Image: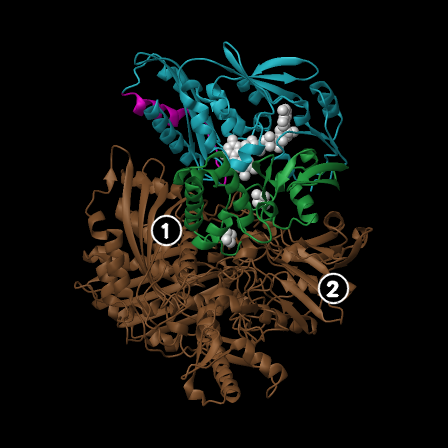
Chain colours: A cyan, B brown, C green
Amino acid sequence: MLNVKAYLKPDTVQSAYEMGQIPGSLYVSGGLMVAQLKISNVERIVDLKSVGLTHIEDHSDVFKIGANVKISDLISNPYLANLNGDLLKNSIKEIGSTQIRNMATLGGSIAFKLGWSDIITIFMILDSNLEIYDGEFSKISLQEYVKKSPKGVIITEIEVPKSGGIAVFEKFAKSNFDIATLNLGLKVVLDGQIVKDACVVVGSRPMVSQRIKEVEEFLIGKQLNGITKDACDLMERVVQVGSDIRASAEYRKALSRFLLDKALRRV
Amino acid sequence: MKTLIQEKLNVVNTSIEKVDGKALVRGKPVFTDDFDLPNTLTVKILRSPHAHAIIKSIDTSKAMIEGVACILTYKDVPHVIYTRAGQGYPEPSPYDTFVLDRKVRYVGDGVAIIAAENQSIAEKAMKLIKVDYEILPSILDYEHAMDKDAPIIHDELEISGAYDPKRNIAAHYEMEIGNVEEELKKCDYVVDETYHTPNQSHAMMEPHGAISYFDPNGRLTVISSTQVPFHARRIIKRIFGVNCRVIKPRIGGGFGGKQALHVEPYVVAVTLKTGKPAKCIYSREETMTASNTRHAMRFRARAGAMKDGTLVALELWGLSNTGAYGEHALTVFMVGGSKTLPLYNKVKAVKFGGDVVYSNTEPAGAFRGYGAPQGMFPIDSILDELAYKIGMDPIEFKLKNSIREGETSPIFKIMGEGREGVDQIINSCKIEECAVNGAKKFGWYEKRKRPRIDPERQIAHGYGVAFAMQGSSIPAIDMGGATIKMNDDGTFNLLVGATDLGTGSDTILAQIAAEVLHTKVEKIIVYSSDTDMTPFDKGAYASSTTYVSGNAVKKAAERMKVEILKAASEIMNKPTHTLELDEDSVVSEDGDTLSFGDLQTKLFYTFNQRQLEVTESFVSEVAPPPYLVSFAEVEIDLGSGKVRVVDFLNYVDCGVPINPVLAKGQVEGASAQGIGMALFEDHMMDKNGRLITDDFFNYKIPARGDIGSIKVRFARSYEPTGPFGAKSVSEIGLDTPGPAIANAIFDAVGIRMRKLPIKSEDLFFEIKKKGL
Amino acid sequence: MKVTIKINGKVQSVEIEPGEMLLETLRRLGYKGVKHACSTASCGACSVQIDGKPVLSCTTFTAAVDGHEVMTIEGFSDENSLSDIQKALIEEGGSQCGFCIPGLVVTSEALLRENPNPTRQEVIDYLKGNLCRCTGYESQTLAILKVAKERQSK
Ligand SMILES: Cc1cc2nc3c(=O)[nH]c(=O)nc-3n(C[C@H](O)[C@H](O)[C@H](O)COP(=O)(O)OP(=O)(O)OC[C@H]3O[C@@H](n4cnc5c(N)ncnc54)[C@H](O)[C@@H]3O)c2cc1C
Ligand code: FES
Ligand code: FES
């Protein structure tokens, strides 16, 4: 049990934001992480689920996904699930467990900026943008958001561009039901055999997910065949990783190579 | 599922449903935490944040907020030294523990007991207790416990039974048969290596917990999730000087973790102080950090053999970590030798010994296998290494040197439970069948012909085998009792002290009684583990329940049969030798029948009135070992070092399985825990000695899908001293996964991993070093 | 605060603390089949269904369940009979100590509703958040597959 004085259920994003500005307030969506917090300065829980934001909209060039959509519902829209070569369809099942996916929301999974978040890696490869509210609505790329960590803002929507290309997600974990020791996402847009565009993201480094520009640049303009080894060498050299209880930095480097190799074989 | 039997049996050797099965799958309120008594106080424990410290002062005055019933510190509880270990009395474990002490010896050691109206008040009060500690230097790495400048962990005057507490040695043991040193010199091949096994957590799903209260007549009653209700009662009496009744409800797994007193003294202290019911249920974090673990051990093993594959000498010299307290220190260590070495009884010389040391880590205790997995890992590994050196198939080598029916080992006599053991000739040993049929079933020879490394997929496959034995009870110590009472509706009450922890012992005991009494299991109403109601039983440990408690039930049922026949002979007016039991009745040669119900009804009301009731006890004289040969196939990702157990086959000789499905479940479950110990379960501490892996998020027990299929096959075996031919089955499965997997990894990539758990990271760097 | 929850088909109005977890509420109300084994969303013992979907009650705020429908293990069988999943778990030896079983049954019911004919791998994937320390999982997986088959043939 959390020792709080109130559990509030605002109707609108605006009123939620106002409640959130009072010191001692904490937003909750899925609640999985909030329920486990061991902090005592929270007095008020502001439940964002009551404001809705559970839409998945298919626009001509983007998907718009409400922040309160559950991880398990991400694949309920077949078009979204099949985007970029079934990226979501293939990767969502790697996240947590059935129960966790039924509880965790997309917004909560991003806002917490967990280093080991698979969701951040997956949506970063998709070049997603966030709609956030901090008194007014604005847009920010997921990459920027993770870097800046703006305080007190509410994530209201995630926008996924319908770009071409094939994307894959790889996760290395000790157990079948475990967070990633390292995760990796790769998207390539091909022109025949030539890589026209590439996006490479590594997460659970154990720091939060990051794009690996050097590897992306290396891939662009090359033929996919025969570059795996060089790409992996480069990855191992440039990726920034750290040590924690799950793995040493040195091992994480090796894993980044291992996962990139697997990903390149898959695309 | 039915396996071969040697007697004509009706109920035994069939997979009937667990007698408690329906209640459990319905989620009925049968566990300790499910019992709610009015006005129960919630008990919480303030625990030490330091690994080793003296409480200079402790101030509870600010914490006595509204709703707090009492806060107890070391000043308020009896200063009686004891051991938490639930073992036969007098215990071979040192007396080195107080309910609360001025000194704390690991992060998690108890500092104060808080009892309040509810959990949030108790937690609030806990934060308001002020403790001033004098922090002492600590020993976090047990391999340094005997260093010259190491701090002394147990300097209390009252300590007794520890080997050399001034040097942090809780226990010491050594024995030698023949002369290992001399024999090794004569060997063609010698291997000398050091092996490590980890301090695995039991991770039973139900956390530790207990409730205490005064019943309406003022008798202190404790409901506890324990494997040892009778030992708990005895130890509570020792500490508090009060008699009590201990009731064990259903238990959500124990695996040895509950073969010790954890929570009972805390709630009893509160009930005695306040007169009120008190309940304490550990959080997962407390269960992980402040209960007990497997003893981590380091063994230097030496083994020598001749070119023809004759094993000549074997030595294990070990160091075991008992953590902050010495429960089960000596006995677990000894089992590392006593239930492993007799398997290779043909050696000319064998030596076993070493020290069990204190350190400022969570206490170690009993854990399924009880030292045998720690001993079997080095033994089986080193034999595998030898076989490879000799150039012999490991199955052939291990089989050639292992024990057979009709043989014995001097170790049975030399090594017992913390003292001398008991001689025994092996009456049943089907290890050869296990190895030969197992190899066939697994496809050992065909698989070993395949290439191991697939360079294209960067994957390696390997195949390993491991042999094991265990015991069935602690001979000349373990005692179990059973009472059978006949009812006028044709049912029987079976009262046993034996402790069912989810293992299904209530069921198999009912099967044994039903078999003897020619009735159905539904007619046997089992009531177990209530110290005021049932006869004594030592508790659930040492693989003894089927063997010891099973034999007690069989004896009691046989005597009940005699009583029934006697009474029937009087009523039916026919000599007893013309009477037999058949389908809930007594039948005579000439076709007369008297149903059990009618018999007891007559005895109640009209004829030579009496209640038929018998009590019998059984003490084991021998501990017939079960045997196991396990085969593992692993798949290794060369790019990450990740190991997957694809296939794990157990071929087991446990005598006649009383209930094949339950027996299979025991082996399957033990294999899973063994695979956990081999590949997944790892404890990590921060530099202050706080466990970081203190929940299921960071301490990974194998999840569904982490293990390929685990298969179990039974050898055709019959143990003449066991009830209906049965031996034990619940522990042995944990002995083989460690070595079988390590051997399979060697087979795949030629790398010997001598430390469990085998982490993918470590294996990866070894693979890289080898340039694979 | 007060919330209204439909539990196993019965609408109940319950007084709760604002920071209370559903697990605590349910156990207080007598649904003891909901088991507490970890609090970190890592074991599945506390699984219940909310609006038909399996979730973890140890990390669900009761306040958030106001107006929703909860099913606990107690709702999946009555005093006289067991559900087919419960029966199969007993027959296959999939239940030893039984502590993980309520959560497993509640989750498996959802699995078979969503995917009446799962493959072995699908069973494993769906149930991977339900830890069991007693069995090696194999017997439980077999039990669920058996029930799926039986339900299909009906
Ligand atoms: C055992 C376990 C295993 C897991 N395994 C994985 C895994 O394998 N892969 C993976 O990617 N994740 C995993 N997760 C994480 C999970 O998927 C979610 O990311 C996480 O639980 C947070 O989602 P939530 O909706 O429950 O957030 P909450 O707990 O509700 O909130 C999390 C944080 O975000 C804030 N917040 C919530 N919503 C918003 C919003 N819309 N705008 C701004 N701030 C907001 C809250 O204030 C809080 O600080 C695991 C979690 C657990 C407990
Ligand atoms: S108790 Fe909820 S997942 Fe373990
Ligand atoms: S049956 Fe005991 S935890 Fe699953």
Q: Residue A45 in the image: x percent, y percent?
A: 71, 32
CA–CA distance in space, label 1 to label 2:
46 Å
On the image, the x and y values in percent for residue B578 come to: 41, 86
Q: In the orientation shown, which residue stands out farthest toward the top?
A: A60
Residue at point 28% right, 33% down? B457
* Residue found at x 55% / y 78%: B598
Magenta-highlighted residues = A226-245
Q: Which residue is at a point 51% across and 44% down the rendered structure image?
A: C130
Residue B287 colored in magenta in the image: no
Q: Nearer the viewer, residue B146 or A135?
A: A135
Image location of residue B536, percent across then percent down: 56, 75
Is residue B77 found left or right of B228 in the rendered image? right
Is residue B89 visible in the rendered image? The answer is no
> If the image is split into quadrants, where does the N terminus of chain B sit?
bottom left
Q: Secondary structure at mark 1?
A: strand
Chain letter of disc 1?
B
- Which residue type carries mark 2? Thr
Q: Is residue A189 above or below residue B655?
A: above
A210 relative to B232, above or below: above
Compared with B717, A213 (above or below) is above
Q: Quadrant of residue C149?
A: top left
Q: Nearer the viewer, residue B306 or C65?
A: C65
Residue A229 included in the magenta stretch of the image = yes
The residue labelled by disc 1 is B710
Tell me which numbered mark, 1 or 2, is placed earlier along the sequence. 2
Q: What is the three-letter code of the residue carrying label 1?
A: Ile
Q: Which residue is mark 2?
A: B271
Residue most toward the front? Answer: B591
Q: Residues within 10 Å of mark 2 (few under 14, many from 20)?
A: many
Residue at 40% across, 39% down: C121
